[in-house]
């Protein structure tokens, strides 16, 4: 539900500003700041007025902030939607990625992969999707590979255990 509302705000912001990439960068910083427990508590608190919440967010922007973005934050505050800033930033980032056809993904594995292997995965995904995909690696306890590109809806698993189970099933069926 929040994402549907956020899409409307993103559309309005996109139509009213010329530099959407800068607005996205600022909203990303605000979203990161709002992940702190103290900030979330203040934003969610009914004891703090909407004006004070809006002033708190605007003070984080600084005095030289873009007037369109300042007005955008004020509208969010008036409509008691400041808690949507992280969702708005996420939707805006997805829109920017879609427009540029460049996406980011994650490769999870137990072992550290060479940059050549990650590059080959990126090439294979590019061939499959037609999009430029930049993969970053994360360590996990998975015995194999797990590749995720959320914005494209791609999730690929290569598990040694699963391959072993399928091989055993094939051998048993062959006998």
Image (cartoon, helix red, strand yellow):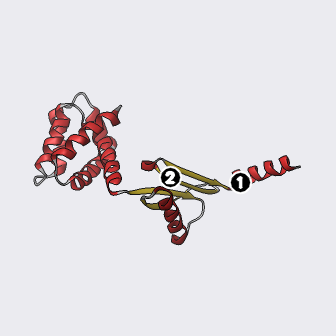
Image quarter where the N terminus lies is top left
Q: Is residue 85 above or below residue 21?
A: above
Side (left or right) of 122 relative to 58: right
N-term-proximal mark, 1 vs 2: 2
The location of residue 164, given as percent across then percent down, is 74, 54
Q: Residue at x 59, y 64 (%)?
A: 111
The location of residue 88, given as percent across then percent down, is 29, 42
Side (left or right) of 64 relative to 43: left
Neighbours of disc 1 within 10 Å: few (<14), some (14-19), many (20+): few
Neighbours of disc 2 within 10 Å: few (<14), some (14-19), many (20+): some
Label placed on residue 163: 1
Task: Tally the marks.
Answer: 2
- The answer to which of 126 and 44 lies nearer the viewer is 126
Q: Tell me the element at label 2.
A: strand
Side (left or right) of 160 relative to 62: right
Q: Are marks 1 and 2 in contact (CB under 8 Å)?
A: no
Q: Is residue 136 above or below residue 63?
A: below
Q: Tell me the element at label 1.
A: helix
Residue with the most extreme top position? 46
- Quadrant for residue 74, please give it: top left
Residue with the most extreme right position? 175
Q: Is residue 166 above or below residue 133?
A: above
The location of residue 174, given as percent across then percent down, is 85, 50
Residue 42 is at least partly visible in this image: no
Q: Residue at x 49, y 63 (%)?
A: 122
The location of residue 153, given as percent across then percent down, is 47, 47
Q: Which residue is mark 2?
A: 148
Label placed on residue 115: none
Side (left or right) of 78 relative to 126: left
Q: Residue at x 24, y 55 (%)?
A: 21
Residue 132 is at least partly visible in this image: yes
């Amino acid at each position: 539900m929040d994402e549907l509302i956020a899409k409307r705000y993103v559309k309005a912001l996109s139509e009213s500003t010329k530099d959407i990439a800068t607005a996205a960068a600022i909203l990303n910083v605000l979203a990161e700041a709002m992940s702190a427990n103290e900030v979330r508590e203040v934003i969610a608190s009914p004891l703090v007025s909407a004006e004070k919440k809006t002033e708190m967010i605007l003070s984080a922007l600084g005095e030289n902030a873009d007037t369109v973005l300042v007005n955008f934050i004020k509208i969010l505050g008036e409509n008691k939607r400041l808690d949507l800033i992280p969702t708005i930033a996420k939707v805006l980032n997805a829109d920017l990625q879609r427009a540029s056809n460049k996406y980011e993904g994650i490769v999870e594995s137990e072992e550290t992969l060479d940059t050549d292997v990650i590059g080959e995965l990126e090439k294979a995904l590019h061939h499959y999707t037609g999009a430029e995909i930049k993969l970053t690696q994360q360590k996990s306890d998975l015995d194999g590979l797990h590749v995720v590109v959320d914005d494209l809806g791609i999730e690929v698993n290569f598990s040694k255990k699963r391959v072993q189970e399928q091989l055993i099933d094939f051998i048993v069926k062959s006998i």
